Image (tube, rainbow, N blue to C red):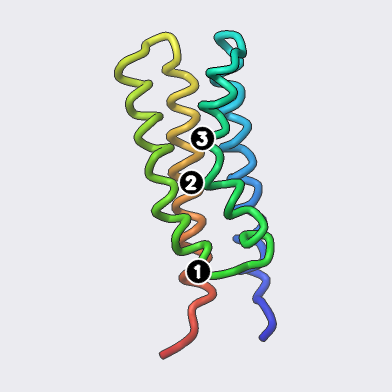
Amino acid sequence: MTESLLATRLRSAVIANAVALVMSLIVWRAMTGFSVADAVLIAILTSPLGIAFPKLLAGNRRTYAWMTLAVTPYLVVGITEAVANPASRAWAGLCLIVAFVLFVLLVGYLRVTRTPA
């Protein structure tokens, strides 16, 4: 089965967006100085993306499906930081936008690659 051009573009966008989400998390913790606790937090927060990344590159639909659920913690962290920490509202807004766009792209890829009933 050949993958359509739209599916290929969506898959590329998902991968780029996942990398952007990881980078935004690293920048967020690096803004306040980078400690061992920050490294552990980043490792915990990015582990779902690290686990999924090889399967995302391969275009595995099941991975795209469970990643829609794995995006939720990033949305929660962004909302929590926006409300609780006024100093990091810019980062929180960026995280929310990137996580939401990642969710939309994942759902879009799933819709484009589904098999007809």
- Between circles 1 and 3, the one closer to the viewer is 3
**Depth check, front residue: 51 or 92:** 51
Identify the residue at image location x=59%, y=36%: 22
Disc assigned to residue 44: 3
Amino acid type at image mark 1? Arg
Q: Is residue 34 left or right of residue 83?
A: right
The Cα–Cα distance between marks 2 and 3, rounded to whole angstroms, is 21 Å
Q: Name which residue lies at 61% across and 38% down.
A: 20
Judge from the rendering whether residue 73 lies leftward or rightward of residue 113; answer left or right: left
The local crowd at label 2, few if under 14, some if 14 to 19, many if 20 or more residues have their Cα within 10 Å, is some
Quadrant containing the C terminus in the rendered view: bottom left
Q: Nearer the viewer, mark 2 or mark 3?
A: 3
Instruction: Say which label, 1 or 3, has the lower sequence index.
Output: 3
Residue designated by label 1? 62
What secondary structure is marked by label 2? helix
Residue 107 location in percent, x, y?
45, 61
Q: Earlier in the sequence, mark 2 or mark 3?
A: 3
Instruction: Name the residue: 44% across, 60% down.
Output: 66
Secondary structure type for disc 3:
helix
Is disc 1 surrounded by few (<14), some (14 to 19) or many (20+) residues within 10 Å?
A: few
Q: Is residue 26 above or below residue 64?
A: above
Q: Amino acid at mark 2?
A: Val
Where does label 2 land, which residue?
Answer: 101
